[in-house]
Image: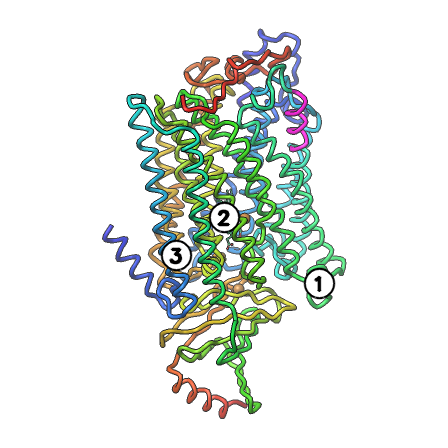
Amino acid sequence: MALLVILTASACQGPVSALDPAGQGAADIAWITWVMIAGTLFFMALMTGLWLHAVYRRSDRPLKLSNTTVLVGGGLVLPLVVITLLLVYGIRSGHSMLPIGAPDLEIRVTAYQWFWEFEYSDDQGRSLTLVDELHLPLGQRIDFHIDTADVIHSFWIPALGGKMDAIPGRTNTLRLVPTRAGQFGGQCAEFCGARHAHMHFAVTVHEPEDFQRWLDTAFEDAP
Amino acid sequence: MSQDTTAHHDDHHDDHHSAHPTGLTRWLFSTNHKEIGTLYLVFSLAMFLVGGAMALVIRAELFAPGLQLVNPEFFNQMTTMHALVMIFGAVMPAFVGLANWMVPLMIGAPDMALPRMNNWSFWILPFAFTLLLATLFMPSGAPASGWTLYPPLSLQGGNSLAFVILAIHLMGISSIMGAINIIATILNMRAPGMTLLRMPLFVWTWLITAFLLIAVMPVLAGAVTMLLTDRFFGTSFFNAAGGGDPVLYQHIFWFFGHPEVYIMILPAFGIVSEIIPTFSRKPLFGYTSMVYATASIAFLSFIVWAHHMFTVGMPLGAMLFFMYATMIIAVPTGIKIFNWIATMWRSSMTFETPMLFALGFVVLFTIGGLSGVMLAIVPANFQYHDTYFVVAHFHYVLVTGAIYSIMAAVYYWLPKWTGHMYNEKLGKIHFWWSTVWVNVLFFPQHYLGLAGMPRRIPDYAVQFTEFNVISSIGGFMFGFGQLLFVYIIWQCVRGGEKATAQVWEGARGLEWTVPSPAPLHTFDTPPVVDDSVAVHKDSLT
Ligand code: HEM
Ligand SMILES: [Cu+2]
Ligand SMILES: [Cu+2]
């Protein structure tokens, strides 16, 4: 048991952990994950309890429940209540992940077999393309416009939020809001061939001023 | 195999059949539902071992981070082939084999309605799998784009794609013919008095499954044919540059794919609903509600497909629809689970191997169902999708669900098939060994997925090492444990304690009224069925 806890903690804190959130989307989802795990454990405990009762009580104590109570209660009311609650959550949280309201920063993402290109640009017409390296400002709404040059890929920074596919012929938009500065890992999440496992990229989340300084220098240095 | 012994017992029993061919032709030309059932089951066992060997290659590579044993290209071929072999070679033929053996026995029919077609539906399969497995030896290698064959990736492979598509067509034809046969048998061949609502639940779930098969196998055939023409004949159904759309493929594929997963679980529900009442010595609780629950699951399975593709960029409204529809499936599924528990309630249970596997099914399948509900929650799916959490989910529903139910069925009916009792002690060891290690194998994968490990990768970040090591150890232990299963079956076919016709004290139904082993020809004169043979009650007492 202790071993399990240690193992859990060690894997939790890696740079690509979705359970160690550093973004609004990821935090939201990590929260519902814990709630659902609790719910799942509760349901499994209920089932196991009923089951053990069924096994060990045998025939010596008559059952008070009627058919309809068991069926309607366990099979209908319980699941309906649970899924209604989850639906409410889904609508609320789903909205928070949509690109609603103007973004503070927009980045064009292009996936290739097997690397990523990230393109920054500003209103003075300066632009900058990075490969497998991403810099983001803390606390700002960032929209990623995701596209691919070949097969389907999926853009994913587990610590910051959910993934979004890069699909030929479309541009998908993903909104992320980093909430903690630091180094994170990103990776391709849609199987894309031989080097899919190695289609990583490095993510650095800066304080906003640092980010602006970095961006200005990078624009200057860009060819 | 098991029929060798049967044939001997059979001679004195049924003289005019003693001219039955022997040797290879006996199996090649057989139109007998029991022999064909045996062929299906043996084939499925062989494919289970082949697919299992591929799984062990995968787990061996994942034992440590970095690339060690195999190159990524071969690793990807393994993940793709493992899935195709297990789904189309192991699980589906096993269920068809069980239907062949048991449906006529359960409804009091002398054979399947279309015996010659029955022969053909089986004998297509060895050809289909020869084509599929031959791709492993082709210069371009086996398909490596995942069993879902998503374009454009799947179109980048070599010519082996054509072989795979042809193999899938053959499997589809085989499944459709099998399904037609099962429907025709159930609707036309029932013994007098075997009304629809007296049919055993295994027959009911197969009837509904057969309709699902007929509805969706052509959809799969259409999808892969479009792949074929895109790859070899210059069309652009899925080619964005030519005006097509790769997402269209995903919609078509999952319109087949989701009902397909229910094709692999509804017969399992049926099996468990046979076994639990037998060893609880009580009729199944809520029989009619089970039938309706099965039918509504089948219906709902057509309107949830897009829960496999939430991340392609859908409107929120569409996502909420698919999310809600998916979660509604939890309701009829919950009804089933409660019915099984209610059947056990206040009963005098015993725990022979079939019952152990059935109970293992109830508990472990529920874990898979619950992780399914977690996956269906839209924003959460953006994190879980295409991670090991999905891998854990579908292995709980398929290995401890579908495969456990098949093992339960084999132990349950093996005495009826062979005329011998299997070795109960070894059977129990098989169950406990499998159950411990299958959890060591798949439970940590939930955690890996939640922490962020993507699926279909031969190499991973070092933070995931510990759980992968545990999972691989579980994989090897579980895998080698299945050799015991093969041994137990072999031993039981060869000999053992003689089985009675009844076999299990609490068993009800027509299949237990014929001798063990079941003679080659049964119910030549139809039995008359009343409530004393098929007892279902909708009350707890
Ligand atoms: C309570 C019922 C179930 C629910 C709510 C459910 C939900 C889901 C969801 C949402 C996914 C998509 C995960 C993703 O890729 O992001 C999924 C995947 C999958 N499910 Fe289920 N599921 C259920 C039962 C089953 C059953 C009974 C089976 C099979 C016997 C099954 C087999 C699969 C398979 C094979 C996949 C993965 C397919 C792939 O991407 O390769 N599921 N399930
Ligand atoms: Cu990829
Ligand atoms: Cu599905």
Q: Residue A33: give its label.
A: 3
Q: Residue B327: give its label.
A: 2
Q: In this rendering, do the residues under marks 2 and 3 share a single chain?
A: no
Q: Earlier in the sequence, mark 2 or mark 1?
A: 1
Pointer 2 chain: B
Q: Quadrant of residue B215?
A: top right
Q: Amino acid at mark 3?
A: Thr
Mark 2 beta carbon near ligand 1 (under 8 Å): yes
Q: Is residue B504 above or below residue B119?
A: above
Is residue B119 found left or right of A191 in the rendered image?
A: right
Q: Label 2 vs label 1: CA separation? A: 32 Å
Q: Locate the N terminus of chain B by quadrant.
A: top right
Q: In the orientation shown, which residue stands out farthest toward the left?
A: A2
Circle 1 — which element? loop
Q: Amino acid at mark 2?
A: Met
The residue lying at 35 percent from left, 53 percent from top is: B469
Q: Name the spot of residue A12 as percent of width and height, x first.
A: 33, 62
Q: Is residue B526 above or below residue A41?
A: above
Q: Quadrant of residue B425?
A: top left
Provide the residue span drawn in magenta: B179-189
Circle 2 — which element? helix
Q: Label 2 vs label 3: CA separation? A: 16 Å
Which residue is denoted by mark 1 in the rendering? B244
Is residue B379 found left or right of B227 in the rendered image?
A: left
